[in-house]
Amino acid sequence: MTLLVTGGAGFIGSNFVHHWLGQSDETLVNLDALTYAGNLGNLARWTRDARHVFVKGDIGDRALVDHLLHAHRPRAVIHFAAESHVDRSIHGPTDFIQTNVVGTFQLLEAARAHWMGLADSDRQGFRFLHVSTDEVYGSLSPTEAPFTETRAFEPNSPYSASKAASDHLVRAWHHTYGMPVLTTHCSNNYGPYHFPEKLIPLVIHNALAGKPLPIYGDGQQIRDWLYVQDHCSAIARVLQAGVTGQTYNIGGWNEKPNLEVVHTICHLLDQMRPRNDGRAYAEQITYVADRPGHDRRYAIDARKIERELAWRPAESFETGIRKTIAWYLDHQDWVSDVTSGAYRQWVDQHYG
Ligand code: NAD
Ligand code: TYD
């Protein structure tokens, strides 16, 4: 039995590889283009493990994907690969359309051809699991109920619009062709191997480096945080027991304003790695210009996955953020590889 995972060298994808190979003997073929966000250092533990087959390549490369599907005959595709950073999508949306929309379309078409060619018994068990985000639902007012699966899409950034477009393609491939798809919408993740361009790893890194901690606007925007290993366990559960054609929201009921998140990190760092001058990390907080079109609030109603698939997160924000900070303190070599760009030089040398 084999899984084809896309984007498995990124933040969530590499955590999923750790999660999966830690509990299963199934081979995992990992297709990743190694953009700036992909880092083979995240997967160093598995380089000599035959269950992990890494392939550098683009999800939009139809010939390559056809070849991988033919050669490995996976029972499922788990699709993480995407351009994922909202600020980058504002500065340059092209890659987001190319990977998230066109790339997903190419992957779906390759998977459909593979699925149609399977024997009846294998065709029934095949799954295409599309990993999406809560950001497709748009922004909530302070008093609105959290997003349910039936909420209309109202994406506001080029990133969320490109993810919403891919979600629509996946839905249509089920409705029109009967493809056995599953879609998940998860809230903001945090944890190990998170690239330090996103809020939580950026704040931990900048705090330790004595740099400003940038708060966009008033810092009262709310995100719903989930520890990344909980997201991985939810995906494994949806793959195992999700009903095809259904969508599942994944979240841990952890709504926090950004400023509170940053203060919590500063407070924990004050205990776990005090500043040399004895002052508080919170003194490094700096208010900067707001993100254009900044969504005010996201919140996930996770009752469907709890009720129908009996999934619950293992971590609260309090336990998860402490683990995350401890991981960054213990993996400063990973952080300096990423922030210095050393991990990119290795990719250039290795793959030319
Ligand atoms: P990431 O940016 O850390 O990783 C993306 C990975 O995809 C990288 O390894 C990159 O090299 C690879 N990739 C990019 N373009 C590719 C292409 N054309 N072909 C093959 N590989 C390509 O992203 P992430 O935070 O790990 O997010 C993974 C998925 O989860 C995305 O689909 C994202 O939309 C979704 N998601 C993320 C969050 C979050 O908080 N990070 C929350 C909900 C959903
Ligand atoms: P981010 O981690 O980029 O995730 P997303 O935009 O997908 O939710 O940002 C999380 C929140 O933190 C978001 O409201 C933007 C805010 N933010 C800052 O205030 N400062 C920063 O330097 C960054 C990167 C984000």
Image (cartoon, rainbow, N blue to C red):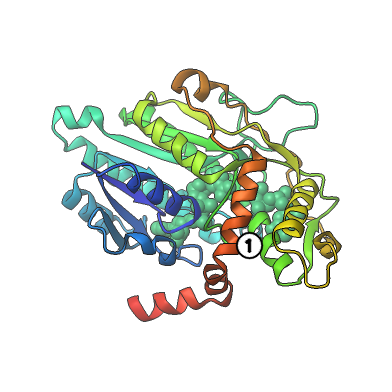
Q: Residue at x 65, y 40 (%)?
A: 317
Drawn side of residue 107 relative to residue 186, left or right:
left
Q: Residue at x 41, y 77 (%)?
A: 346
Q: Which residue is mark 1?
A: 197
Q: Amino acid at mark 1?
A: Glu
Which residue sits furthest left?
A: 119
Q: Quick one: quadrant of the N terminus?
A: top left
- What residue lies at 23% left-to-right and 42% top-to-bottom? 113
In the rendered image, which quarter is residue 130 located in? top left
Furthest residue in direction top, as rendered: 307
Q: Nearer the viewer, residue 279 or 186?
A: 279
Q: Is residue 288 above or below residue 118?
A: below
Place of residue 117 in the rendered image (x, y in percent of width and height, measured from the top left):
16, 38
Would you place residue 197 above or below residue 158 in this image?
below
Q: Position of residue 107 (x, y in %)?
A: 34, 48
SS of the residue under disc 1:
loop
Q: Residue at x 83, y 67 (%)?
A: 278
Q: Is residue 71 left or right of residue 129?
A: left
Q: Position of residue 203 (x, y in %)?
A: 71, 60
Residue 172 seen by the camera: no
- Callout 1: CB less than 8 Å from ligand 2: yes
